[in-house]
Amino acid sequence: MTRHLRERVTRWISLVHRIIGAPDYEGYVVHATRCHPDRPLLSRDDFVRQRLEEKYSRPGSRCC
């Protein structure tokens, strides 16, 4: 796969993840290392678990 095509596929996957509300670990890593270098990074599993708990623990956040 060419570099250009790989970048487009990566952007497309990222867009789909944002649309469906899937956690963005890579975005978290970039943000955390830039803005909070003194804090340890969560593992991918811990990050996903935390985001899902936040998403489903808010009352009224679901449509059904």
Image: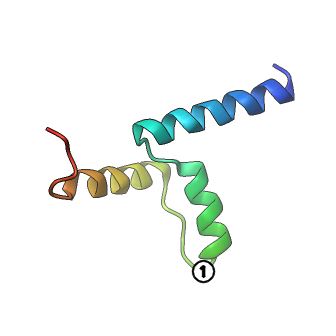
**Occupied quadrant, residue 41:** bottom right
Residue placed under numbered mark 1 in the picture: 38
Which image quadrant is residue 2 in? top right
Image coordinates for residue 34, horizontal then vertical, percent: 68, 70
Residue 51 vs residue 19, the one in the foreground: 19
Q: Position of residue 61 (x, y in %)?
A: 22, 51
Q: Amino acid at mark 1?
A: Asp
How many marks on residues? 1
- The figure's colour scheme reads rainbow
Looking at the rendering, in which quadrant would you find the C terminus? top left
At a point 45% along the width and 47% down the height, the residue shown is: 23
Residue 23 lies, with reference to residue 16, above or below; the image says below
Q: Which quadrant of the figure contains the N terminus?
A: top right
Relative placement, left or right, of 42 versus 52 is right
Q: Residue at x 59, y 67 (%)?
A: 32
Is 43 on the left-hand or right-hand side of 64?
right
